[in-house]
Amino acid sequence: LEYMRVAATLEKVRDEYSSNPESTEFMLRKAVERHFDIEMVEVIDSNDIEITKEGGTFFMRAAYEDTVPLVSNVSFLVSFDKTVEVAAR
């Protein structure tokens, strides 16, 4: 469920800043932070999102692991990785 909120946040930020030539990494990170607050994402924060720029395109990547208890001392370790492309041209 948490992964779905993280993925939805990245997609919302992509939709907000797509085709905006004035987009900056700071603007994207602040938008992610705002959406994480609204969606109550707690497994990662906006500083954990890797934002890189290649040409006129930003790439936002959320790669993290979460441990979920199953029973007694047995847990699942789940890895998540979501990348979104923001074409800010």
Image (cartoon, grey):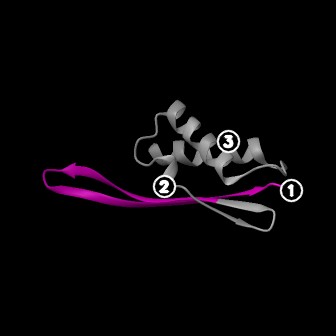
Query: Count the marks: how many?
Result: 3
Mark 3 / mark 1, whichever is N-terminal = 3
Q: Which residues lie in the magenta part?
A: 60-89
Mark 2 / mark 3, whichever is N-terminal = 3
The residue beneath circle 1 is 89
Viewer-nearest residue: 67 or 74: 67
Instruction: Measure the alpha-carbon separation of dots 2 and 3.
Output: 17 Å
x and y, in percent, of residue 58 in the image: 71, 60
Instruction: Measure the alpha-carbon separation of dots 3 and 1.
Output: 17 Å
Q: Amino acid at mark 2?
A: Asp
Q: Is residue 53 above or below residue 36?
A: below
Q: Amino acid at mark 1?
A: Arg
The residue beneath circle 2 is 48
Element under disc 3? helix
What kind of secondary structure does the magenta stretch mostly adopt? Answer: strand
Element under disc 1? loop
x and y, in percent, of residue 1 in the image: 45, 42
The residue beneath circle 3 is 12
Q: Residues within 10 Å of mark 1 (few under 14, many from 20)?
A: some
Q: Residue placed at 44% from the left, 59% from the top?
A: 64
x and y, in percent, of residue 76 in the image: 29, 58
Q: Residues within 10 Å of mark 2 (few under 14, many from 20)?
A: few
Q: Residue placed at 81% from the left, 54% from the top?
A: 88
Please give the label number shown on residue 73: none
Mark 1 / mark 2, whichever is N-terminal = 2
